[in-house]
Image (cartoon, rainbow, N blue to C red):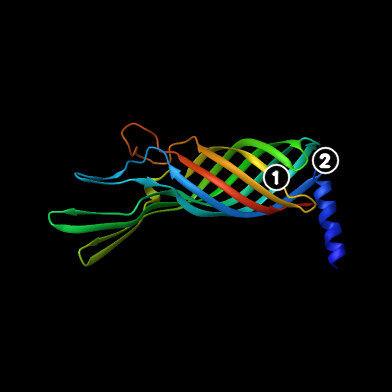
Amino acid sequence: MMIAAMMVATLSANAQFEKGTFSLQPKIGINLAKVSNMPNLGGGDYTLDRSLLGGAAFGVEAEYQLAKPFSLAAGLLFSMQGCQWKDDDFTIGGEKIEMKDTKIELNYANIPLVANIYLFKGFAIKGGVQFGFLLSANGKSTTKVDSRTTSFDEDIKDQCKKFDVSIPVGVSYQVPTIPIYIDARAIFGVTDIAKDTMDGDKNSKNQVFQLTVGYKFAL
């Protein structure tokens, strides 16, 4: 059984580079996300600085090999995006205030369409366009004033646009002899995600670094 599995894996790994072949790649990974032009929160003598928000990404991608060095791929991925602010504490009017877990969580169903150029076997550079459909949006924060703790969790989907367009660029690499793919992408938002601008006249756009691992097999 083990030998048979290794043979199938090897055949899959080799077949993906043949012209006219289809392959499928279930994948899972992580996002590091932010939203451009989101203001630092606070006022007066305190400010909450922005930081990257971690989240999951998983789904499946199909690839068609047009020629040995060139292929087209389309996928469907669930993607946890958004932005967050760093935890901090400060004093106002003699009261100690702590703010924690301040974030905006945006969940998307994304459809990436990318072209792959294989520079050498197993290693590809890629770029394309991604269409995102907003599934949910929530604003969250926890505030502690002296010994009193207040949690904020609000659905803000009606304040966000339901459709998003982004440009993904990146690289991928297949581990030698087995059809395990590592894919790294920088995803740059094109559309303003907010119905009303959040920082003057500047648009707020998704920006995501995505790292996934997938198992790729020929169909």
Tell me the crowding category of disc 1: few under 14, some 14 to 19, or many 20 or more residues within 10 angstroms, Cα based: some
Residue 217: % across, % down: 77, 53
Please tell me the numbered disc located at residue 207: none
Which amino acid does the dot numbered 2 rest on?
A: Gly
Could you tell me which secondary element the residue under label 2 belongs to? loop
Q: Residue at x 47, y 36 (%)?
A: 191
Please tell me the numbered disc located at residue 20: 2
Whichever of labels 1 and 2 marks the residue nearer the N terminus, that label is: 2
- In the rendered image, the residue lying farthest to the top is 201
**Residue 202 lies in quadrant:** top left
Give left or right: position of 177 versus 202. right
Name above or below for residue 193 compared with residue 79.
above
Residue 68: % across, % down: 81, 36
Tell me the crowding category of disc 2: few under 14, some 14 to 19, or many 20 or more residues within 10 angstroms, Cα based: few
Name above or below for residue 201 compared with residue 157.
above
Give left or right: position of 218 versus 155. right
Name above or below for residue 64 compared with residue 94.
above
- In the rendered image, the residue lying farthest to the left is 93
Which amino acid does the dot numbered 1 rest on?
A: Tyr
Q: Badge 1 is on which residue?
A: 173
Residue toward you, 165 or 58? 58
Residue toward you, 177 or 27? 177
Q: Residue at x 33, y 45 (%)?
A: 49
Q: CA distance from mark 1 to mark 2?
A: 20 Å
Residue 105: % across, % down: 43, 53
